[in-house]
Amino acid sequence: MSHNFQDQDQYLQPESPSAVPIVVGQTSRLPRRTVIKWFVAVAASLKLGDAQVFGAEPGPGEPVITANGYGKDPLLNHTHNPGDLWPLTLSPTQRAAAIALADVILPADNLGPAASQLRCVDFVDEWVSAPYPAQLRDRGIVLPGLDWLDAESGRRFANVFAGLTLSQQQAICDDICFQARAADELQAAARFFSRFRSLAAAAYYATPEGWDAIGYVGNQPSLTYDGPPEAVLAHLGVEQTVA
């Protein structure tokens, strides 16, 4: 995957593979306000309802995390500090694999920085560590998937995933990046890759840098009302009637 959707079925080589350092020892926690905004933006892009993002109770059979979270009726006038409501739970090894995988999926290219530079894995760590149903479901997919990546890397190349060359990492990803084409024994890994890719991409494109990568401008303030562009009016076959 790359930021260029014309090439979305191909891995785009970074201009310089060594130009994007993999930083594993990132310890500063994202601000709570940033986490909440990011959660809501990603939930919207993944078509999750608010209740699935901020529901208070995990579903039956889901792994139990003891943190309470915000609950369905959070105190909006209370100041929470990073780490107050749930701890981050990716292990250093899982975090290293996640950073490397996110950068394979979203490398630095001519349209934007690498996922690691935008702290997308910090978001993923917050997501899979949160005590809500949607996040707990993803936790049951993402954590075993990251462990599988390292195990598969060891089996094929005698190293962990983060320690492989880009071509070695891509060789593994090529086998699991399309579930319909994945071998039967790789179906679980393919489901993990699909979910991780969705989370990483949603996190990436919820940032201003991600907006720039796809040319999203959003609402812009203006001192005048100029109406829709002529090209848009012509495309729709209508005329501007409001001065």
Image (cartoon, grey):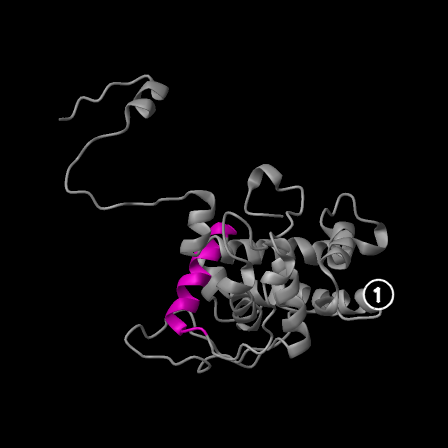
Q: Is residue 8 left or right of residue 53?
A: right
Which residue shows up at 64% across the image and 69% down it?
Answer: 62
> At 42% from the left edge and 74% from the top edge, which residue is drawn?
70
In x, y percent, where is residue 123?
Answer: 51, 66
Q: Position of residue 108 (x, y in %)?
A: 56, 55
Identify the magenta region. 30-47
Left or right of 79 in this view: 191: right
x and y percentages locating residue 215 in the rendered image? 42, 42
Closest to the observer: 4 or 235? 4
Q: Secondary structure at mark 1?
A: helix
Mark 1: amino acid: Phe
109 vs 94, left or right, is left
State whether residue 46 is above or below residue 227: below
Q: Main secondary structure of the magenta part?
A: helix
Give the residue displayed 33% in from the left and 25% down from the top.
232
In reply to whether residue 32 is colored magenta, the answer given is yes
Q: Which residue is mark 1?
A: 157
- Image quadrant assignment for residue 115: bottom right
Rate crowding at label 1 as few (under 14), some (14 to 19) or many (20 or more) other CA atoms within 10 Å. Answer: some
Q: Is 38 placed above or below 205 here?
A: below
Quadrant where the C terminus lies?
top left
Q: Is 203 situated left or right of 20 in this image?
A: left
Rendered location of residue 142, percent (x, y): 66, 65
